[in-house]
Image: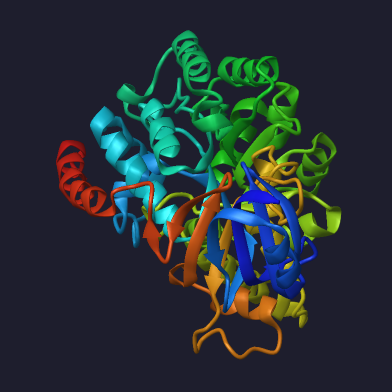
Amino acid sequence: MKCDLLIKDCSVMTPEFEIVENRAIAVDGTRIVEIGPSDEITAKYQPIETLSGKGKLCMPGLVDAHTHTCQQLLKGRTMDELPMIWSRILVPFESNMNEEDVRVSAEMSCLEMIKSGTTAFADAGGVHMHKVAEAAVQSGMRAAITRSCIDIGDFLPDTMKQPLETIIDNNEWLHRTYNGAGDGRVHIWFGIRQVMSCSPELIQAAAEKAREYNTGLHMHLAEHRDEVRYCLERYKKRPVEYLDSLGALGPNLLTAHNVVYSEHELEILKERGVKIVHCPRANFNSHGFPKTPRMIEMGMSIGMGSDGASGSNLSLFDEMRVFRSGLHAYWGLPVFDPLVIPVDELLKMITIGGARALQLSHEIGTIETGKKADLILIDLDQPHLTPTRILVNTIVESVTSRDVEDVVIDGKIVMKNREVLTLDEERIMYESKVTMDAIAKKAGI
């Protein structure tokens, strides 16, 4: 039997996060058609292309459920900065970017994500987002993209604000032009930057348009106490209560950060089916510790995001490791509970949890017959990974981005033996260095 791609002699991570050895995966077109013992599958299929999985673990491609590709060229800039970083540095930086700047930033972001094992991402929106869509198509990645939506805020540059009608018109144009691009890998969403920078009318309009187009809605929510105070002072409601009153909450809403919630807000979010995404390093550095153990207990859908590269990097393996340590120190140690965030819950967040946040859990997030072939191969033949008594524990504690050897997205090999096949790494690295300095000068930061 013919197939397009055969990954043989690998270990495989099951949807239950168990590790099964000596397996092969047959891929035809964009989908996994069979998984089984390596000898049997190898004898059954005649592939056009073969990937060796010897000494490797095949696991689902990671899903970065909240990032900012327009902030890629701010890497290293925001550490040790006082609040409010997003209004003082991030948004002003974006406001000075032209189309070519965004192109370079997005290509660099996709390059770093692929080399980190990330196969899909949700971009919260910036400027010239058609260039981000084009970079996703070129790179072979899967993406849910919106544009920056800001119409109020005295603390933000006027260049980033637009009238409500212009914002919605531009978002609709982006949807008409790029939704479904890249053989269906690119999805265009609507966006709400956050409650302090969006009028009630814009929030309602974005939510209505997302429902009309049957697409997702992406926003920052409960990121810091200033946001709670703003809503209480202006609307006499906490942020979740305020959004609920506007009809913005629903299962198509992806919320990033999710740090400062009351119990009542958590109950509303759970009832509405809102998708939670945590950004551990960004949250711990300046916002606080979310009530994730409670969210897990409630059965809420939780994903994980990098929040862009300005403060760190795009490695979800790093995010996962920091998240475990931080939550254990904050929630576990005071009550002598080492299981406040189990290993399988962390692995869910960077795989199937992210897939749910992107409205794609029926297609990606686990390795199963019939699902899209979004897969990564981890090189286990290394001193820091082998031998191990419990491999899933070692993945969480020890795997780094550089251990990702091969990446398959939509059934196509996009990285093989650490070489990205879809992007010109040398050119992108050079252009990124030149462009970073030029934007910083324009932005004065």
Quadrant in the picture for residue 6 = bottom right
Can see residue 354?
no
Q: Is residue 184 visible?
A: yes
Count how many numbered circles sit on residues in the image.
0
Q: In this orientation, which residue lies closer to the viewer: 367 or 51?
A: 51
Q: Quadrant of the C terminus?
A: top left
Q: Position of residue 188 (x, y in %)?
A: 55, 26
Q: From the viewer's perspective, is 390 left or right of 138?
A: right
Indicate how the structure is coloured in the image. Answer: rainbow
Spot occupied by residue 265 in the image (x, y as percentages of width and height): 76, 42
The spot of residue 81 in percent (x, y) is 34, 57
Residue at x 75% of width, y 30% of height = 250
What residue is at 15 percent from the left and 41 percent from the top? 438
In the image: residue 197, left or right of residue 53: left
Question: Eyeballing the image, is 320 above or below 443?
Answer: below
Quadrant hosting residue 17 = bottom right
Q: Residue at x 45, y 15 (%)?
A: 170
Dividing the picture into quadrants, the one containing residue 106 is top left
